[in-house]
Amino acid sequence: MGRMGRTMELARFLVVAAGSTSLFCTTLALDPSWVLRVKDGDTFVIRNAGITNSEDVRVCCVDTPERKAPGFDDATAFTDRWLQAGPFTLTVCKRDSFGRLLGTVTREDDNLATALLAAGLAVPYTRK
């Protein structure tokens, strides 16, 4: 099975694992072509090889401005550029209260959440 085949199998696994109350996490190596769109600075949509055509992903541990709030456009553009810059890793352990995959997004030693915080485009997420 080639790399794409393994990635597709992992994506199918992601749908099952993330939707359950399992005690394990799954990690996917993705490239920018998996990103369908960026909704805001902390949420983006990826292609899915499972039951649905797409999955919303919420970046763990940060909160960025919502639509029409100051900083929304900058945070959204930053996340889009970061995701399009090359292959990245998505680690998912659960879903949030809205059903989105809640994940850590990294590329080598870079972490999207940390990058958003360092750029002043996000604040640490606190449950409301």
Image: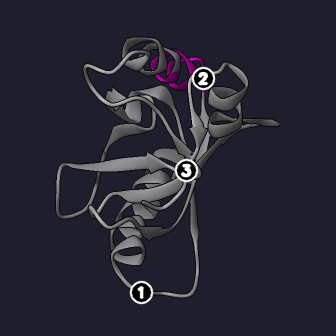
Q: Nearer the viewer, residue 114 or 63?
A: 63
Which residue: 34% across, 41% down? 46
Tell me which label, 3 or 1, sits earlier in the chain.
1
- Residue flagged by tag 1: what amino acid is it? Thr
From the top left corner, tell me how far across and down residue 107 is, in percent: 70, 35
Quadrant of res 72: top left
Which residue: 48% across, 61% down? 127
Q: Nearer the viewer, residue 7 or 1?
A: 7
Mark number, residue 86: 2
Distance of label 3 from label 2 (alpha carbons): 26 Å
Color encoding of the figure: one colour
* Mark 3 residue element: loop
From the top left corner, tell me how far across and down residue 62 is, in percent: 56, 44
Distance of label 1 from label 2 (alpha carbons): 31 Å
Asked if residue 1 can be seen in this view, the reply is no
- Residue flagged by tag 3: what amino acid is it? Tyr
Image position of 95 with respect to 68: above or below: below
**The magenta segment:** 79-86
Mark number, residue 125: 3
Mark number, residue 21: 1
Image position of 83 with respect to 42: above or below: above
Eye-nearest disc, 3 or 1: 3
